[in-house]
Structure formats: C-alpha cells, structure tokens
Amino acid sequence: MREPSKRQIENAISQFDIWGKVINHRWHGNGHINDTRLITVQRDDGQIVYFILQMMNTSVFTKPVELMENIIAVTKFIKAKVIARGGDIEREVVNVIPTKDGCSYYVDKEGNFWRLLEYISGATSYDSVDDPEIFKASAYAFGRFQNDLSDFPIDKLHETIPNFHNTESRYAAFEKSVEKDIAKRKSTCEREIELLLERKPLAQYFNKLLAEKKIPLRVTHNDTKLNNVMIDDITHKGLCVIDLDTVMPGISCFDFGDAIRFGANTAAEDETDLSKVSISKELFTAFTEGFIEGCGGRLTSEEIDSLYLGAMEMTYEVALRFLADYLDGDTYFRIDHPSHNLERARCQIALLLDMEKKRSEMEEVVQELKKKYKSF
Ligand code: GN1
Ligand code: MG
C-alpha cells in the first residue's frame, strides 16, 4: 500500500466531524497492514486533543464497508455492556468519529478509505511486557471482549476476510507459494519450508474440533496481539481492546493462542537472534489465568483443554503466512527491509519448536488453572 501524502492526510481529516486546528500528524503504532496516524488538534481555547486517523488497506480488507458495519455494530454492543457495568464509554470501547455527513468512513477521490477514531488518553499499547501482571491484564481484557460479545447475533457479522484463521487454507496457500516461487527466494529458505510442510497435521486440529462440534464458533477478535489492548497508565488494567478489523465468527482458543505467540515470546516477533526466542512459562501462566477469568466462565471444558494447542496452531499459521509472503515477494505485510518476512517466519518457527518441547508443561499449567476455576 502506498503511503498517503500530506495533502491526502489533511484532506481526509477535514472530512470528519471534529473542530479545532490540526497542528500535527505523525506515524503511529506498529501495525503491519493499515496506515495509522496520530493527529494532534488544538481547540480554540488552546486545549490539545488527539485522534487516530487510519487509511485502510483495501488490498487486505477488500470489503471496507462491511468491515465498518461490523465495527459499528460491535462497538455499539460493547458500549451497552460498559454502561451496564458502570464503566467509562470514552475509554473502554473504540469510538468511531463520523464524517460531517454522518458516515463512519470517508472515501477520497482516489478511492482510499479513511476512518477517524477517538484517541484513548492515559493508556498505553505495549509491544512487549516483562511484567506478568500487565500481560494478565491484557488477557483479562481479551477474555472480557469475548464475554461481552457472547450474546451478539453472530449471523449479523460479515465475514470480511473469509478463512482468515483457517490454517488448512493458509497451508494450501503456502504450498502454492512454494511451488510458484515467484520472487525466486525458495533457495534461501529450504529448511524453513521443510519444517513447515512436515507439520501439516497442526493445520487441521481446530477444523476437526469444529467439524465434530466439540468447540463452538464465537464472536472473536482474531488479532489479539498485546499491542491491541490499551493498558491504563495508572491502574494497569486492560482498558480497551482496539483494532477491530478482524472481528468475525471465530475460535476462542485462537484469540488466546495469537496473544500467547506474540506476547509470551521472550523476544520480538521479528527477532533475528533465535537464541532469545522462547515461550515464557511465567507469561503463559499469567495470560491463561487472565483469559479464563475474563471469559467469565463461558469457556467450555474442551476449549480450556485446547488452549495451548491454539497457541501452537496460531504460531504455525503466522509462520506459514510470513514465509508465504516472503516467497510471494512481500505483497501483504508491511516490511522494513527485504528479508523482514523471512526473519519473522524464522522467529515464529523457533517459537513453535520451543512450544513443542514445552507442550506438556503448557498443558499442565492450563489443567492446574482449570481446577482453580472449577465452575466449568
Ligand atoms: C497483522 O496489522 P496487524 O499488525 O494488527 C495481521 C495479523 C497477523 C499480524 C502479525 C489483517 O496484524 O493477522 O497475525 O499482522 N492482520 C491481518 O503480526 O492480516
Ligand atoms: Mg490488525
């Protein structure tokens, strides 16, 4: 996706229903897909306020209108839950700011889709944490998010990216990328390709559980990276789950799993020193506890038993996706340098290998916590 120009950004901001003078806009966050900017606005009385402006990546989100319909419906629903528990609707749910015409997005002359969101102040989105309490707070927030949406009419949601977490179709796409070798990079990652192809059964695990109706389909977030939760700077509680682009019918264990693969890794997602990559038992335990609690007793016994496998399948899936994108010539994820997707894939493979070693340890942690929350 091409970066928007200053003119495009300023034109987009001017379409939304906000008042005051825009005094600054700068790149914000670490998302791999959309273009996200922090906008600083000065009100007439001198007060400074912030907003989040996003130009949506419509090659990835090919149905932006449906996507915004999902976000509006889901945030409205969560808002009612926040009010019911006496929370703060300014800070505990994503607030979409309409355009002057009352639309939740703006389409510019070039066909780019824009949206403006309320900035949540006094809170931080972390790319990594060492403190298990903060990680647990993020887990609680993701669990509560699912809990809040447990009675959302699932058939009202558009499936904006079909098969998003269908690991078997990710596997098939990966095989095609290997076969085509469009960017002529296959020779630089033979070992990684082999490691991923060997693990095909991991791609089938949750599809089987779903097909056998052993686990339910729920309204899930589907992109539960630690940096998608705002943590309150004072209370250190998980305040608000953000980045709702992929809210769709999904699998609870995948929300758990994606958060583990990102946040319980002792290294960054693209760490090149693979000796630093491992799954932290302490962070894994903290997250599991927070997530089960946050789900408020809704997880079934089978779901809890499969949580750690959700972490393994999600790590495997994103490794397939990063390596496929590397082989395709980097058409999907934003990269900082040409080998970035290969490095990301290697890091995820190293994490998966560590999880394979610690599989029974993770299972034990989950079972211990399951006993603790006996209500299941
Ligand atoms: C993308 O944009 P971001 O960083 O929230 C991707 C996720 C991946 C993640 C890997 C729509 O998320 O699925 O897990 O990168 N989002 C989409 O870091 O593909
Ligand atoms: Mg995202």
Image: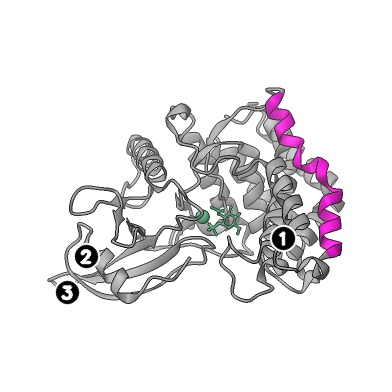
| Disc 2 target residue | 14
The three-letter code of the residue at mark 1 reads Leu
| Image spot of residue 372 (x, y percent) | 69, 35
Would residue 37 appear left or right of 140 to someone viewing this image?
A: left
Query: What separation in Å lies between label 3 and label 1 (alpha carbons)?
Result: 49 Å
Query: What separation in Å lies between label 2 and label 1 (alpha carbons)?
Result: 40 Å
What range of the chain is rendered magenta?
190-211
Q: Secondary structure at mark 2?
A: helix
| Disc 1 target residue | 323
Which residue is depicted at the point 53% across and 44% down? 161
Q: Main secondary structure of the magenta part?
A: helix
Q: Secondary structure at mark 3?
A: loop
Which residue is depicted at the point 44% across and 65% down? 35
Disc 3 crowd, CA 10 A, few/some/many (<14, 14-19, 20+): few
Asked if residue 289 is among those painted magenta in the image, a careful observer would answer no
Q: Ligand 1: which quarter?
A: bottom right
Q: Secondary structure at mark 1?
A: helix
Give the mark toward the camera: 3 or 1: 1
| Disc 3 target residue | 46
Viewer-nearest residue: 221 or 298: 221
| Image spot of residue 67 (x, y percent) | 42, 44
Viewer-nearest residue: 140 or 103: 103
Going from N to C along the chain, the mark reached first, 2 or 1, is: 2
Going from N to C along the chain, the mark reached first, 3 or 1, is: 3
The three-letter code of the residue at mark 3 reads Gly
Report if the CB atoms under discs 2 and 1 are less than 8 Å apart: no
287 relative to 19, above or below: above
| Image spot of residue 259 (x, y percent) | 62, 51
Going from N to C along the chain, the mark reached first, 2 or 3, is: 2
